[in-house]
Image (spheres, rainbow, N blue to C red):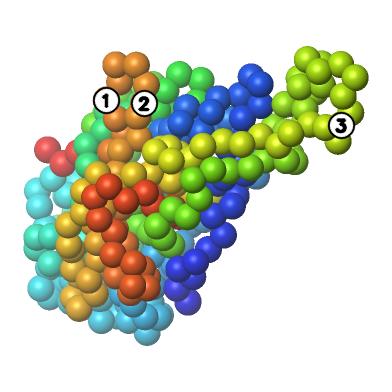
Amino acid sequence: MSERENTPSFEPAASAAGSGPNEPRPEELAAGREQGAAPEDNRTHRESLGDQWAIVLGGDPAALMGQVVGTVLNAGGTRECWRRTTYKEEYVLMAWPAEGLLRASVLMRGPLEGELKPSTAAPLLEGLPNNLMVEDVHVWPSGVEANVGVSLSENSNPMWFYDPLYYRDKEDLTPGVTHTFLLAGLSFGIRQALLDEMTINSGPQFEAYAEHWLAENPGKSRLDVPPIKIPLTGSRIIMPGEYFGEYHIRVPVTSVEKAQLERQPFYAIRVEFGMGGENPPLQIMIYAAERMCKGYEPKAGDEIDAIIWLQGRVIDV
């Protein structure tokens, strides 16, 4: 499977962030406030990791996964907090390298006192801690991994992420219960933000704005309605992508460090989205493959546009 393009269309995220007379401004759309976005039933749960592995490995997963699994099982390690035993089965997550921000993982599964066999394989991203309330869970066919929906603020749609340790976390993922989740993102495309202002002159947000403007300006025609101009500089916007767990973001960079998997260098980019009020910011560590940046080197203070796939798990204890 081929990699995602480094220059995907970022416009869906921007056009979703409309600002009619009663609509929130983009800076108020931070941290998953998805008003104006496509309804959730327009998205689907994509139950595969081919695109993610292509980015992490820098090549065709079909040709490389055998080598990845062999390396993880021969040279990788595990932690007690990644293991789970039930009355009839045992689960052990192996990861390689033993330490690092970005790793390859293989879940071993089998009957008690029997042979453990590989069940699933996933990139394992070290994330940043966030206290989030569980809203919903979508279990993948494997039964050991899932997409998890969490609430970020009152009256907001859930934010979704992939949980590679669902086999361990599932008993805790009760709707209405708050946990500390480690949250990270893998970049499908990233660039330095190009626009300081967004213009909206069509769509449902504009129509609501135009109706309001015409009511306040009697004698004017539809052709007189000015476009909506929204300042973007300094905005912290996160909007749904095509699939659950994928998001378009525009956000300033808090800090950057280097990460590496085998010979593939990555930028580990820390970003924050304000939650409003006294709530702490939503923190995400985003991993962007150096080769996907095509010469762009992110640094603290930059404003970036990116498409990311979110991964999370209950904090390791």
CB atoms at circles 1 and 3 under 8 Å apart?
A: no
Left or right: 266, with 16 as reference point: left
What type is the residue that disc 1 sits on?
A: Pro
Q: Residues within 10 Å of mark 2 (few under 14, many from 20)?
A: some
Seen in the picture, residue 134 relative to 168 is either above or below; the reply is above
Left or right: 107, with 296 as reference point: left
Which residue is drawn at the image coordinates 33% and 72% (left, top)? 295
Q: Residue 114 in the image: state x and y as whole percent.
A: 19, 62
Which residue is drawn at the image coordinates 45% and 19% (left, top)? 154
Q: Residue 97 in the image: state x and y as whole percent.
A: 12, 67
Give the residue number, with chain letter if any, for mark 1.
280
What type is the residue that disc 3 sits on?
A: Arg
Disc 1 to disc 2, C-alpha distance: 6 Å
The label on residue 222 is 3
Disc 1 to disc 3, C-alpha distance: 43 Å
Q: Residue 231 in the image: state x and y as whole percent.
A: 51, 37
Give the residue number, with chain letter if any, for mark 2.
275
What type is the residue that disc 2 sits on?
A: Met
Which residue is drawn at the image coordinates 43% and 41% (left, top)? 233
Q: Nearer the viewer, residue 127 or 234?
A: 234
Q: Does residue 291 show up?
A: yes
The label on residue 254 is none
